[in-house]
Image: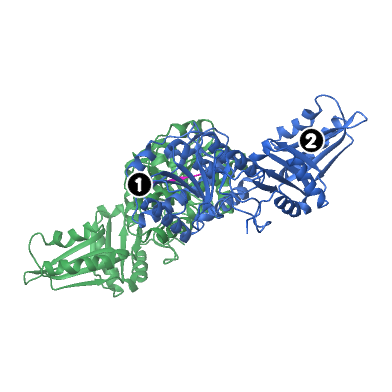
Chain colours: A blue, B green
Amino acid sequence: MGGGAVALAMALIVQKYGGTSVGDVDKIQGVAARVARYKKDGHHVAVVVSAMSGETNRLMSLGQQIGGEKPLPRELDVLLSSGEQVTIALLSMALTKLGLTAKSFLGDQIEVRTDSAHGKARIERMDTQKLRDCLELGTVPVVAGFQGVNAHGDITTLGRGGSDTSAVALAAALQADECEICTDVDGVYTADPRIINNARRLGQVTFEEMLELASLGSKVLHPRSVEFAGRYLVPLRVLSTFEDGPGTLITMEMDNMEQAVVSGIAHALDEAKITVSGVPDIPGIASKILGPIGRKNIEVDMILQNTGADGLTDFTFTVKRQDFADALTTLESVATAIDAREVNGDDAIAKVSIVGVGMRSHAGVATRMFDALAAENINIQMISTSEIKISVVVAERYMELAVRALHAEFGLQEDN
Amino acid sequence: MGGGAVALAMALIVQKYGGTSVGDVDKIQGVAARVARYKKDGHHVAVVVSAMSGETNRLMSLGQQIGGEKPLPRELDVLLSSGEQVTIALLSMALTKLGLTAKSFLGDQIEVRTDSAHGKARIERMDTQKLRDCLELGTVPVVAGFQGVNAHGDITTLGRGGSDTSAVALAAALQADECEICTDVDGVYTADPRIINNARRLGQVTFEEMLELASLGSKVLHPRSVEFAGRYLVPLRVLSTFEDGPGTLITMEMDNMEQAVVSGIAHALDEAKITVSGVPDIPGIASKILGPIGRKNIEVDMILQNTGADGLTDFTFTVKRQDFADALTTLESVATAIDAREVNGDDAIAKVSIVGVGMRSHAGVATRMFDALAAENINIQMISTSEIKISVVVAERYMELAVRALHAEFGLQEDN
């Protein structure tokens, strides 16, 4: 078998290739060769592809030149979805050139039904009959990721990470043995290898951990696709399009898993912090602050409220950096209305998180984390925890140092 | 009204914009402004667009890099049809920016049902209900030209001139008052203005004449669209996207028409001539020669057979230049089989034609044509006639001279 370590006999495998994997003609031919190896080994393969890298940005730029910052959502989806249409046709041709039979499918051709939230639609169901017919004949179905169709027959797109979600949904609907996310990295690492040069590739990781890692800034997989895979128990494997190797298998909790307390360190530089200070500490104040933010469709991540001694409180939360200016503007009038002392913002922050299912049963993990950061004189600005992760906000300039310190503290480096 | 000379009160107009008319963001915005003028004048407008100029070639090149000279037809159609998808989205955005409401439609969204001849599909029917709903609400439907969908739901494309055909089919189905073909020239001329600088724009021309002019090398309209318009009596107007003006109306024979004997001169440089000499003059010889050519899907245009005195005959026909080499190769074995003396080819030829419905009732037109060419010492290699046209094949180097001579002979120049 081409890339996987697990020798699945005659398995049904869904493979998703992202934009960099199909970035030019040569790479598309490489993907075709990779699919052919799986077919030769006797597997059934269904492929999901993204647009060629750069193409979605090119189309978006055209759309914005005409439609402004936020082009008409229905038409933007028509525009963007043309990118995947190009790739499915080219890959089907490349597969055919290698002697395989292949057939492309657009979202609407296999009725990838979504809701009508253009630009961030959610898949409701899909009709797999045509795909099953293909697979039975030995034909490789090549499906356009990222796109679907709503009840009115309008094209929708799934937003960031949409093709991953398409692949997982397809694997779930086809009850595939595995869903391979073929990308330009060879797996999920204990930390970003660009920061930690002895970061270790994880052989396995649980859906929950991957979800936290994905949400917390690990760019390998989009959280939606992980959530989807977890819900439908689709074994998900992240591996390299370009090199052989087992990658990282994302699955349920496993017996043979390295029982590390912490599986990985994630970091995110795409958030900004806003503090509303001197707010009267009365019920309903949080919703008065966050209500207007929510109505502007600005997503809030961490929320923190400290009670002060004088009946006043400081209210702090984080938003995506791209929404920072918008959020500040929105809060100006809110601050006046609720009689707050002042509104401060800081977008030079980083969120650093430790993730691990082992954390559940190990007390003192948080203390180890805070101690390790203190030892490096890194001031913690905010803390947020869940069952299997602890996140801290630190000044942006300390991000790398924090990741390195935590990677060492929890013994995540590669064994030498 | 923006461009038309005929003030149609509250008309339903289908407008088709070709690749050069939507070649970049500025031009798309210009098209939107043009549509807006028609809407402001109270007309209902439905728009059909091509891919941005250069886009179809770019996609075809990608397809050929992967799929070879003739990529998989089904997938090539998926690939190429993405070009129009981009344009309908962008134009809909541009219209919306101008305060209009607009909605894009792909071929399959309005069920432009075609046969399954990928790359040259023929439209069988379409469902106009969604378009009518749009028009009633004052919304401008923006339809992807060139594409349809077969009975299996596969995307098909209509081939060269496909968007013109889409527009005419749409106009027929909607029973539109007029179908405007908006392009980079301001109408149909008595001859190619690049050759004849005093060529005159025709105010009106009949479907039959236009069909001959289109078939004979006038690049303005594709013959299929003219044929379609003639069959469904869709008034067709060729006019400029970029300048105001009445263009040329293509319609039934008209009372107020300038009763010229000859309406226009067409020329074509895309043919090649093949002569099979010394063929036994026996029944069935034509099909023995042309049968293998037809089976290779090579289209034959003019056919000419002279009987010789010695029981042998020369058989001459023309094909498209792109098929010339293929046709010659095909004929090598045929020539041996039918015991022909030799096969000669010449691709340095031009076809020059005079076209006019007036010809029907005027004897001696052919003589005037031949005399005019003889006066310039131009040798005629082949002659072919129909009710409303006479075509001659001459050496390619005489093409311009021949067009000029005939343009003058039949008094087609602009009045000064």
- Chain identifier of the residue bearing label 1 in the image: A
| Magenta-colored segment: predominant secondary structure | strand
Count of numbered circles in the view: 2
Any mark on residue A139, and which? 1
The residue tagged 2 is A304
Is disc 1 surrounded by few (<14), some (14 to 19) or many (20+) residues within 10 Å? many
Disc 2 residue type (three-letter): Leu
In this rendered view, identify the residue nearer to me: B179 or B316.
Answer: B316
Disc 1 residue type (three-letter): Thr
Q: Is residue B250 left or right of residue A21?
A: left
Marks 2, 1: nearer the viewer = 2
Question: Residue A14's x, y, as percent?
Answer: 45, 44
Report, in whole angstroms, how far the alpha carbon at label 2 lies from the one at label 1: 54 Å
Identify the image quadrant of the C terminus of chain A: bottom right
Residue farthest toward the bottom in the current orientation of the protein? B377
| Span highlighted in magenta in the image | A138-145
Q: Look at the image and tell me whether residue A257 can be seen.
A: yes
* Picture quadrant of residue B383: bottom left
Question: Residue A184's x, y, as percent?
Answer: 55, 55
Residue farthest toward the top in the current orientation of the protein? A283
Q: Is residue A69 left or right of residue A241?
A: right
Instruction: Tell me the element at label 2.
Output: strand
Instruction: Tell me the element at label 1.
Output: loop
